[in-house]
Amino acid sequence: MSPEVLILGAGMIGTCAALQLARRGLRVALLDRREPGRETSYGNAGLVQREAVQPYPFPRDAQALGDAAFGRTPAVHWQAGALPALLAPLARYWWHSAPQRHARISAAWSALIAHSQTAHADLIAEAGAGDLIRPGGYLQVFRSAPALAQAAAKAQSLASAHGLEHQVLDARRLQALEPALHPGPAGAVHWQQPWAVRDPGALVQRYARRLERLGAPLLRGDAMTLEPWGEGWRVHADEAGWVHAPRVVIALGPWSAALTRRLGYRLPLFVKRGYHLHHRGPATGPGLRLPVLDAECGYVLAPMAAGLRLTTGAEFAPLDSPPTPVQLARASACARELIELGEPLEAEPWLGNRPCSADMLPFIGEAPRHPGLWFDFGHGHQGFTLGPVSGTLLADLMTGAPPLVDPRPYAPARI
Ligand SMILES: Cc1cc2nc3c(=O)[nH]c(=O)nc-3n(C[C@H](O)[C@H](O)[C@H](O)COP(=O)(O)OP(=O)(O)OC[C@H]3O[C@@H](n4cnc5c(N)ncnc54)[C@H](O)[C@@H]3O)c2cc1C
C-alpha cells in the first residue's frame, strides 16, 4: 500500500479531508482506531449550521460571566478540578473574545461557513445520503419577550450582513409550527436554511463508503504510532502493518493535541464536553418537527432516527475525566418545561468533546516545523457543519490549487 496522503482520524473532519483529496485523484488512506464517525461526529446535534456565522465567544459581560461562573445557566458547567489545567487556554480564549478581535475572527470563520452547506450538498449527492437530511431549518426558542426581542434584532443584523434566511415567530406562530411544544415561550427565531441530520454518525459512514468506492482503504490502527520515516511518515495499521506516505494529515478532533504535543507543538487547544440522551418524545400527537435550541437554557432537542436527542451545552473538564450527571439533569429539567420528553431510551448518556482552540478558529494547513505534516482540527461547536469545506480548503492547499477562501487565518503557524 503506498498512499500519497495518510489521514489520521475518521470523524467528519478526517473523512471529508480524505474524500476531498480522493475526489481530486490523490491516492489516500484513512486510519482510525474505530469505525468512521463513532466519536464526536456521532453524538452531536446533527445541525448543518449555515447561520452559525460567529463562533461562540467566551462571555465578557458581567451578567453572562456570573451566570457561567456560578452555575446559574445549564448551558455551562465547570469541573472545579479542571480549572488549573484550563487556565492558560481559557485566558487566551477570553482575550480573543474581546469584541473587536471576535469580529475579525468571525469574518474568517464566516468565510468557511458560507461554503459549508454547498460543500455538504456535493458530498451528500455523491454519497447517496439525501435520506438522512431534513431541510427546514431549526428554531431558537426564547422564553422571555425581552430575550426574543434582543435575539430578533441580532438575527436581523446577521441575516442582512450574511444573506441568511430567517423569520421571527411570536408565541402563536411558534405553537402553530410546533404543536408538540407546551405553551409558554415568548417565541422563536426560525433559521430556515440549516439542515438537520437524522443520524450524524451515519452521514460520516456514507461519506466513508463513498471514499472506499473511490478506491481508498479504511485502516484500523493507533495514530499515536506516527513517526517520521525517510522523506515522509509512517503509522502502524492493525492489519496492513506499517503504512508509509510522504504526507500525513492529523484530523483526530479532540485527540489531536496529544499527538501534536508529542511532535513538539504546544497549541492552545481544549475541549468543551457535551452529553446526549435520547427520549421517546410525546406519547400522543405530533412529535417535534424541527430541532429546537432552548436559547436561555443552552441545550438542543433534535428529532433523530434514534429518538428525541437532547444535547447539552459546554462542560469544561479534562478530556478523559469521568462523566458528571449535573448538566444533563439540569437541561432535562428545563426541557420538560418545553415538551413532553417521555422516558429516556438509554441507561447512560453519551459523552463527547468539542475540539476547541483559543482563537476559535480551526487549524488547517501545513505544520510549521515538519514538512509533509498537515493539520485539520479544532472546529469547535461546528465541526459537523465544516467537515466538507474544511476538506476542500485542505485539498486546495495540498494540491496547490487556488484556495477557496483566504487560508491565512487558519494557518498552523499563526500561534
Ligand atoms: C453535544 C455536541 C453537540 C454538537 N452539535 C453540533 C452541531 O449540531 N453541528 C455541528 O456542526 N457541530 C456540532 N458539534 C461539534 C462537532 O460534533 C465536532 O466539531 C466535530 O464532530 C469534530 O469532528 P472531528 O472529526 O474533528 O472529531 P471526531 O468526530 O471526534 O473524530 C476524531 C476521530 O479520531 C479518532 N482517534 C482519536 N484518537 C485516535 C488514535 N489514537 N488512533 C486512531 N484514531 C483516533 C477517533 O476515533 C475519531 O473517529 C457538537 C458537539 C457536541 C459534543
Image (tube, grey):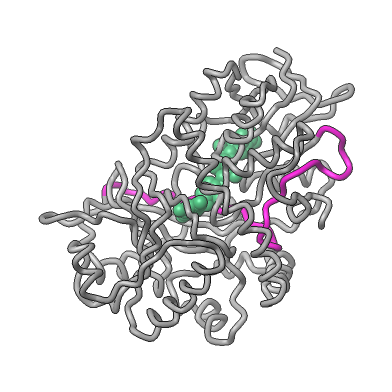
Q: Is residue 40 visible?
A: no
Residue interval drawn in magenta: 345-372
- Residue at horizontal 69%, vertical 68%? 93
Q: Is residue 11 visible?
A: yes
- Residue at horizontal 79%, vertical 49%? 412
Q: On the rendered structure, is 148 left or right of 8?
A: left
Q: Please tell me which residue lies in front, 232 or 150.
A: 150
Q: Report the number of discs.
A: 0
Expressed as whole percent of the image width and height from the top left, the position of residue 250 reads: 70, 38
Expressed as whole percent of the image width and height from the top left, the position of residue 333 reads: 30, 69
Would you identify the image quadrant in which residue 199 lies?
A: top left
Expressed as whole percent of the image width and height from the top left, the position of residue 305 reads: 30, 42
Q: Is residue 344 above or below residue 390?
A: below
Q: Is residue 363 magenta?
A: yes
- Quadrant of the rendering where the N terminus is positioned: top right
Q: Please tell me which residue lies in front, 187 or 156.
A: 156
User: Furthest-left residue in view?
Assistant: 284
- Residue at horizontal 59%, vertical 24%? 220
Q: Please tell me which residue lies in front, 345 or 289.
A: 289
Q: Quadrant of ligand 1?
A: top right
Q: Is residue 212 above or below residue 141?
A: above
Expressed as whole percent of the image width and height from the top left, the position of residue 163 reads: 51, 62
Q: Is residue 194 magenta?
A: no
